[in-house]
Image (spheres, rainbow, N blue to C red):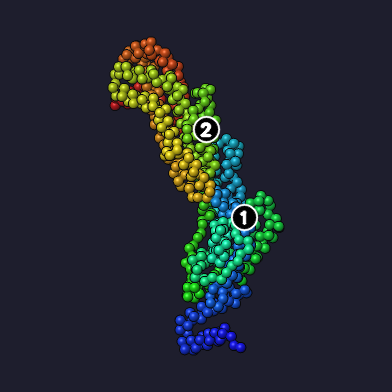
Amino acid sequence: MVTMGFLQRIFAQLQIFFETLLAGSSPEVKKKQQLREFCHLLKDCDPPLVRADGYLLPAFPAGLFQLYQIFAPVRETLTATVAQQDKRKSEKYRDYLLELAFTPDQRAQRKAATLQDRLTALSARTAPAERMIEDQGKVFGFFLKSLESKQMQNVETLLNELDALADFCVFDFNSFFAFFDPAFRAHEGLTTTVETPSFKAIDPAEVVPALLDLYYVVSRLNLTDTIQDLVSILDAKKNGVPLEEEVSSRVSKIFQSGRWLLANRVGPETLLRILRVQKNDPSFAPDLPTQKSDYVAQYKSRITEQFHSDSRKMLKDRELCELNDMIANTFGSIQLETIEGYSESTNTLIQEFTTSSLEWIQPLEIIKTFAIHFFAPYFSSILKSLIVEGYFNNRTLQTTLSAAYYYCESVTGKILEFETLFRNDQQFSVKKLTAYLTELQNGMDFASPIRKLIGGMNGQAKVLVQQAVNQYAEVYNFANIIIDDSKRTVPEYITNIRTLTASAKNSDSFAAMEREIGVFRNFLEIMKKYAIVGTLSNPVGISEQTES
């Protein structure tokens, strides 16, 4: 008995024959022939991927599910290394792979550019630190130039291919499989999945957008032996063990199975045939966005930033010993006052995740300490009395020095205002900074907002330091004018200076100012390390400047 299916096949073949005979090689006939060829190839797979009416059979998602499961260990390795959310950690793994390709000379140059080796070299030579750091910078520049080699370009290509593999591994297969088995919906966006799927045949029109996404990640796969080796290296590095045959063999088996499935069941050609049949266009080619990361340039940028940060740290540490001695000689046993928000604890947090730093912590602490422990008790009272009650021969001098004094008297208040900027919901909120750093740790691109925030903090601090030092220098010179003028038989600047300084009200505070004027000068000598300080102890020069 002749079946209906047999008759349909005979009819279809006759139709093709007459179309070819009558239409010859017309574009429309060629198009139909190509589409039929794609359908036959999909049906002739073992097992078939589509049935006669064009529906995708369960064998299609089953092949993908098998591929998905096979690459689960690779997904685990990549998401814990180069594809993990913590950008800093992923960069370290990627840098590790880059540096494996270094020549012996490059390895030696890279090691010489580390902070530890640079400090060792610095301590072994008697040349000035600035000259040594400049010489190290020249050697580092030659190293950076060497990274422009063809070898490093090839490594960058491999890293991008590794990214393509990672994109495939983290593709949301559960959402795709949910079209064929609703049980997968509970696992969408998760790393878990259905253990025993029950796939059904579906109309491919339902999954065309998802197929396009899938084609994008599958078409970029390049499962070469080199990529296989890189995965093995990352797996060993992740687990902190040497790369041994057991690891390489296990990864090799995964890649062999994956290559077979892509070549015979669910590769990019298969996906493209399904899409072309659905689009009714045998030449349909999806627009695939190009994605390439300049990893060598990024690596150079990171290590350059670190190198300059280390240079600043080396110079700062070099000066720190000298500064600590100066601070101890100036303030004795008094501990430096801290700045709320703009502090070492905040700086430690910043440097844990970035190469940036808070650059004005110590000068602000020194200013605050001097303002509280020396200026307020030993200078403020007598200076205010003289400015208010003194008979100045030069009113311009009185006005200028009065403005400087009142600024210095308000320094502790200005520092308090600065500190409030770091409280919650304020311009430089430490809470906001911490949130940014947390997002950076989680892989979000917050480097630019963090740099901007830290730049604002440092900018505000720098202005406060320079303004305070300028005014303190003016007041210091004013104090020397007073001390010098009080010793003259005929005062030159304040006619009633001797009466004021000898009064019961002012004698003790004047004596205290004379006793502590050396501390004032030492304070300003320290501040020369951080700010521009004019000529000190030159009262005549000040007077002449105000008169001119």
Image quadrant in which you'd find residue 170: bottom right
Residue 77, numbered label: 1
Coordinates of residue 301 in the picture (x, y in percent): 51, 49
Rendered residue at 53%/77% (across/down): 53
Mark 1 Cα shell of 10 Å, populated few (<14), some (14-19), many (≥20): many
Image quadrant in which you'd find residue 267: bottom right
Mark 2 Cα shell of 10 Å, populated few (<14), some (14-19), many (≥20): few
Nearest the viewer among 313 and 543 is 313
Q: Give the residue number, with chain letter if any, for mark 2.
A: 319
Nearest the viewer among 419 and 191 is 191
Relative to 6, say whether 347 is above or below: above
Picture quarter with the N terminus = bottom right
Coordinates of residue 300 in the picture (x, y in percent): 52, 50
Judged from the image, the secondary structure of the residue bearing numbered disc 1 is: helix
Three-letter residue code for mark 1:
Thr
Three-letter residue code for mark 2:
Glu
Q: Earlier in the sequence, mark 1 or mark 2?
A: 1
